[in-house]
Amino acid sequence: IMKIVIRSTAGQAMSLTARIMEHALRRDPAMTLGLATGRTMDGVYADLVQAHRQRGLDFSRCQTFNLDEYVGVPPSSGRSYRAYMDTHLFSQVNIARSATHVPDGMAPDLAAHCGEYEHSLHASGGVDLQLLGLGRNGHIGFNEPFSAFTSRTRVVTLDPATRDQNRDMFGGDPDHVPYHAITMGVGTILDAHRIVVLVTGAAKAAALADMIEGPLTASISATALQMHANCLVIADETAAAAL
Ligand code: GLP
């Protein structure tokens, strides 16, 4: 079942998302959180850091698994998603590094690493609450068009459009954006007990309409979420404009 909540502004949509995560973590401090990166998420993590500082939200018992990471970008690079997570959340709350999992884009054997990532995810009991953003081409994580709905964590080739959208992180030149990434698969994402998708901005309106109202199709990975038993979509008005 997909439920949809529309908020007037992106800020309100972000705060609601953060409040839902805070509530889930208070109910089950030892939960496993699935986390996402991207500009859309900046405000969510800022709110969670504030919840930690002002209301003592405790991260010391939870585990986190991120959706994706660029291949060939070291964790120490400011451009990696590991660095994004460290900066926006992990370094600002009480979570041990060993409890945070982000795929390693520098792993010598990437295929083996993807298998191990799935294994640790499973060993943690699986994702209780998965936070998701939406790509303009309908990707979730880095599951580009035509990813199988049953796909697991693997190495993928990025869409030229995706590399272009993320070029700002790499000095503005799409050619400097990695060609490959590691991502949890669509099947991996669907295994989460509960999913919260945050979608803001007019650039996402078409993808959001396809995700919610379009037919199930591997050409738009996010349509797979229609099959999930507990998926909440939080959108602002501009993103919801084409619904
Ligand atoms: C990126 C990430 C996704 C993210 C999406 C939207 O490429 N791999 O996990 O949800 O694209 O990003 P943004 O929030 O910056 O629009």
Image (cartoon, grey):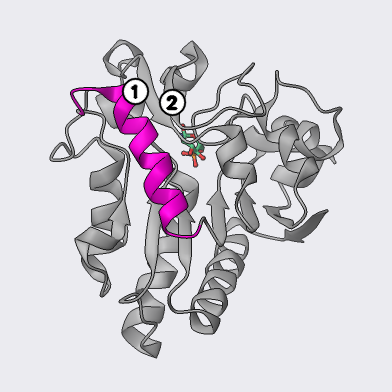
Can residue 89 be seen here?
A: yes
**Figure check: 157 above or below 69:** above
Mark 1 CB within 8 Å of ligand 1: no
Quarter residue 58 falls in: bottom left
Q: Tell me whether the residue at label 1 lies in contact with that at label 2, contact meaning CB atoms closer than 8 angstroms.
A: yes
Mark seen at residue 111: 1
> Badge 1: few (under 14), some or many (20 or more) residues near its Cα, within 10 Å?
some
The outermost residue toward the left is 76
Looking at this view, is 149 or 91 the one in front? 149
Residue 141 percent across, percent down from the top left: 51, 36
Mark 2 sits on what residue? 154
Main SS, magenta region, reads helix
Secondary structure at badge 1 equals helix
Residue 115 percent across, percent down from the top left: 38, 33
Residue 189 percent across, percent down from the top left: 58, 43
Name the kind of residue labelled 1 in the image.
Ala
Looking at this view, is 234 or 218 the one in front? 218
Q: Is residue 164 magenta?
A: no
Quarter residue 219 falls in: top right
What residue is rendered at 76% in x and 58% in y? 6
Q: Is residue 121 magenta?
A: yes
Looking at this view, is 25 or 52 the one in front? 25
Secondary structure at badge 2 equals strand
What residue is rendered at 51% in x and 79% in y? 28
> Badge 2: few (under 14), some or many (20 or more) residues near its Cα, within 10 Å?
many
